[in-house]
Amino acid sequence: MRKNGKTAKFFSWYTLTAVAAAAVLSALGGIWLHGMPLTGLPKAEDVEAVTVTRGQQQVELTAPDDVLLLAGAANLLSYKPFSAAEDAPVLTVTYRLKNGDTRTVEASAASVWWNGRAHAVHEPGMFVNIVGTLYLDGPGTE
């Protein structure tokens, strides 16, 4: 394709810059609106059993539906980047994987602990209330 004796360009630095800027702004907007998701959470098909603990209450779940629900519920724990934990954990969810490893998520109404780091939760109370209501004696955020 020729236009005025020059070959038309299929690549433009201006277009590349505009697309990259739009992608970065979209990602930042998504994180601002929905929080940063926890990375490295186990997939439901890799989990053999889940143990939910709050205070003296402890429940071990092995039913496939419960494992699927609790593996998905951990996705509710989006956090605010560059934030610190606001209180102590009240709920512990331990995933026992089929390969023998364990992964532990601790949470309170306002904070989450994962991979040795503590963050403020983007949607306070949601995870603790849902898991507490479904598997323990009510929502109780203690």
Image (cartoon, grey):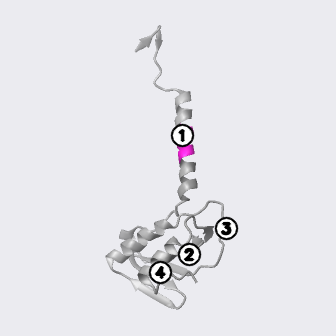
- Residue 138 at x, y = what percent? 47, 84
- Residue 134 at x, y = what percent? 41, 80
Q: Which residue lies at the image location 56% right of the left edge and 33% below the top edge? A: 17
Residue 107, numbered circle: 2
- Whether the residues at callouts 2 and 3 have beta carbons within 8 Å, the answer is no
Residue indicated by mark 3: 84
Residue 41 appears in the figure: no
Q: Amino acid at mark 4?
A: Gly
Pick whichever, 90 or 8, lies toward us. 90
Tell which circle, 1 or 2, labels the residue nearer the N-terminal end. Answer: 1
Pick whichever, 29 or 61, lies toward us. 29
Q: Is residue 55 above or below residue 107?
A: below
- Whether the residues at callouts 4 and 1 have beta carbons within 8 Å, the answer is no
User: Is 4 a magenta residue?
Assistant: no
- Residue 2 at x, y = what percent? 42, 12
Q: CA distance from mark 3 to mark 1?
A: 29 Å
Q: Which residue lies at the image location 57% right of the left edge and 39% below the top edge? A: 21
Instruction: Say what secondary structure mark 4 lies in.
Output: helix
Instruction: Say what secondary structure mark 2 lies in.
Output: strand
- Whether the residues at callouts 4 and 2 have beta carbons within 8 Å, the answer is no
Q: Which residue lies at the image location 66% right of the left edge and 60% below the top edge? A: 82
Q: Amino acid at mark 2?
A: Ala
Residue 22, numbered circle: 1
Q: Amino acid at mark 1?
A: Ala
